[in-house]
Amino acid sequence: QLVYFNLLEIMTIVLGIEGSANKLGVGIVRDGSVLANPRVTYITPPGEGFQPTETARFHQSHIIELVQKAIKEAKVDPSELDAVAYTKGPGMGAPLLTVAIVARTLAQLWNKPLIGVNHCIAHIEMGRLITGAKSPIILYVSGGNTQIIAFVSGRYRIFGETIDIALGNCFDRFARIVNLSNDPSPGYNIEKLAKQGSKFFELPYAVKGMDVSFAGLLSFLEERAPKLLETGEYTVADLCFSLQETAFAMVVEITERAMAHCDANEVLIVGGVGCNVRLQEMMNCMAEERGAKLFATDERFCIDNGAMIAHTGCLMFDAGVRFSTYLDANVFFFPYLSIILVKDSDTRSTSFHLLGRMGIRGLWTYIQSNSENFSSYELHNQPLVIDAENFASLCYRQAALRCEYGGEYLAFKGYVQLFLKQFRICRVNPIFVFDGCHSKEGSKLDTLLKRNVDQFNKLSSALRNINSISNLDSLDLKIDITPRLCRHVLVEILRESSVRYIACEREADISIAKLAISLQCPITSGDSDFLIYRPIDDNQVYSFIPLSSILLDCKQRSLPCSVCKLDGSPCFFISCKVLNNSGPFYKLKYPMLPLFAILVGNDITSNIRLPAIIDSLIHTSDLQNTSYYQRRIHAIFNWILQFCDMKQPLSLILSLYSQNERDDIEETIRSGISDYFLNISGENLAHALGFSNKHYVSLSVPSSSKLENSNIQNSTTSWGSCFEDPFKFSKPIFERNNDKVSIFHHWPKELIKRFKSLELIPSFLDYMYVRNGVVPRQVVEDIKSPNSINECMSKMRSILNGLIYGLEKHLGTNEKLCGMENGCVTEYRRSSNGQLTKTLISVKPLKPPCAKTPEFSFVSFFSQSFNVNLVKDFKPLEIQGLAVLLVLWFRSSFHAQSKAKNIQTSPVGLALSCCAIAINLNCEFLGRNNTFEDFVNSICTHFNKCADLAKSVYCQRNSPFFCIEDVHQLNELQSMASGLNHLVALIEVLCPFYVSNIDEFDTSHLKNSFISFYPLWMLFASGRLIYWIGRLLQSLDPSERFHKVINDWLPKLLIKTNFISQQQDCAQRDFTKLFNLIDKLN
């Protein structure tokens, strides 16, 4: 059955009301066409300005009449409207409130959504609509604003602005000085008089970098104008002429500087002052000299009007923005906020993802149920230690990106960059700390097995129902499975942004906590284990911020802090919550707190028997309206709270076990408590991150936010006589950190460096350095297939394990290989029914082939291990890297071979190659004019449109069922790509190491000259795009697929620039080189 899509686009109609100052306008816009735009102006007598109260009364007396007039002119009925939009700010409070109340009332009467519009953005969007400017530098000049703004890829960036009063305000106040009429506006009368002026009076010219100042210029005129006019030396027309020429020269200068910085060829003038003909003449002269083009409008759209609010409301409505029709504190606002208008895309998930928190089950819900457990906190001008694993998962979910297509990593990159941008603005120095390998003992095995089975069951349930849904992009799979490469992509982003990060040798939680204490700064995570950590030293401060409480919106302080005041910088902060050390949860003292966590149950320990009193407390709890689990936590908390030391509760727990069981249970509890014991110092980690003693000792939490630890019980007295030495609990940790069993023991220094920088991937090392076996991650895959996604990596993993085994044998440090037993490592493999089976895999020691140089060793390794003969001096290296990836994947993928005879006809392989080459060239050519941060969103938007097109074409001819096999192949490619990156990083060190046979070998050989890789966020930018192009190619004859890609889809994926012909030539050249090379490698 063919499914046809209705391609008729329903046009959005919005009524917009503008009233932020003395202009009141009502506009109606239908999909970019202005249907009505009546406007009235509150005019005051000469020499007077307009006051908020009087202006609001004027708006109140005219607004209903204007609404009726607009509806009549537009010839629409209120029922035809899609939404009501209004000016949310910035502006004058009383007029804004009048407009907001009327808009809210109309929205309720007509049962329409309410949309609040930023006044500044509306000016810009209207200017772009009327003039057709694409990516201009914007001069926004009005009575309340003067800013130089770059508009690129749907984002606004302020390059410069007035540091005191706006240009329009300067003109208005000068008009009062010389007693000019306010009818129709002071600026218009200044412009008219300036045409009659002929004598120039030199005025202060205040340009400061990218900023301007008009206050001094105005003060200069205030002091001298009366005398100059009285003596007849200058006329009012001369002063108007001088004021215009000076002020306009200032703003044209900084506009030209912004254009040079961005290499822009368009400039757009918006705002009320923007309709001044002389300003447009001066700007046009500058633009022509630069070979650029000026875009400007007349007074209909430059001056405040309702149509600009309606048009921007249309954009926001189409993007899914809606406000409540009930007034609250957010109905209008005063400060300028630069917002992003991005059309909603199908890379965004329709489901709401809960943060996948780990640690103590149910503890987040329990603690957050009492608001007194957290207090408000302002992040500003300080370090912030971040649990990187949790951050990666949180960002993907908060961005609401889709999971079922294999990951939307380019959009993920854009969202992470927004976080980093907020940190920079607020002068927060983020420090990301990643996990290394799992714990040596493999103590989380049961948790990992259970988690894997749970995720498999969710995936299985979703896939059973998927084919009954006709519109795949409205599909809500309800699967909480983070795409495989989020962690790796985060590392790439941090590396590109020069943000501090590091990987610990093993799991990082305790190291993260100690690092924050050493740096005397807050820590943030979504893992509830961090609620349990406490410093042992009473003089140390531990400040924990829930990651989900950090708002992606910075605010400016009215009074700057001392640091910002000293250097004259704006003082911004991020609002969040911090664990309150005087809240109810802090009543539980250390070390009773870890005991509480163990009894509740965490990732390692659960099902400890509880005394009967707990059951009684559950049934008599004052939380009867909550879940059983919340009442259970509350009961355990209150039970432990009554004890002053460990002796009695531990005795009561052990009494529930037989004599033979007690030793094991006591050891389980002892070990569990030690996992929360902050006995190690964070100084080593701080040094590894580049902090010196002097540096991190001087760092501190701002005094306004500093927390005290006065209510933490002295750890040396709270353990009771049974455990008089608290450090008994830390002995297992000291043993685990023994140097001889450290993963890094005797490793080459460069290999350690690559581990800590995550060029090596710890999960691939778990096989050799973690007991009890490895549980591979569950991803979206074909669960009916007898071959799991991880099967395609069998040969690669065997080689990786063999190289590590060979290294440790060479170093004589085999005792570190706790993951090996009788020459085998353990992996839990999934069967088609979802069961995980323990499988032993034989490992043989491997070394790169002996050769005279590391280069020959490197080439020989690929030839002997993978039967791939790398081509010397091949350029670009990334194309050879992509070719090797595709060859190794296709050889090992059952699904790929079942869909195509070779890579040249593989739908997924062709789609991936096409997208990777296109995004690389998009970044290269767009980067000639802009910074990367400016065009991530542009590429995302373009790729989303291309995915929509591919989907539309495919669904017109084919049944739109979800093809899990294609997503399975894409996730195979992701596994292979991460493994190949890891392998190359490993043998780049091992080849010169074995050739020189010393630790301090020649580092010039470390970067091979044969193979490199596109960043993973680039290679797998959009799973949805790859999926739909792949589906479309699958529907074609195999002989047509290659030509369809190179002649049709590759050009479509390129964003048009001034170099489009060169782009297309480069794209076809790289694509052809790639597949010619694949023929050679095979």
Image (spheres, rainbow, N blue to C red):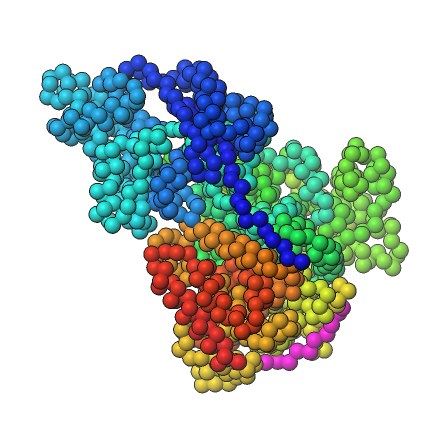
863 to the left or right of 132: right
The magenta span reads 837-846
Give the position of the N terminus as an image quadrant.
bottom right
User: Is 346 one of the magenta-colored residues?
Assistant: no
User: Is 840 one of the magenta-colored residues?
Assistant: yes
Find residue 825 and report its image quarter: bottom right
Q: Residue at x 47, y 53 (%)?
A: 942
State the image coordinates of residue 774 (x, y, percent, origin top left): 68, 66
658 to the left or right of 230: right
State the image coordinates of residue 618 (x, y, percent, origin top left): 82, 38
State the image coordinates of residue 69 (x, y, percent, origin top left): 45, 22
Residue 45 in the image: above or below residue 468? above
Label total for image? 0
Q: Residue at x 55, y 49 (%)?
A: 7
825 to the left or right of 879: right
Residue 340 in the image: above or below residue 683? above
Residue 368 or 1061: which is nearer the viewer? 1061
Residue 253 in the image: above or below residue 298? below
Q: Main secondary structure of the magenta part?
A: strand
State the image coordinates of residue 770 (x, y, percent, origin top left): 67, 67
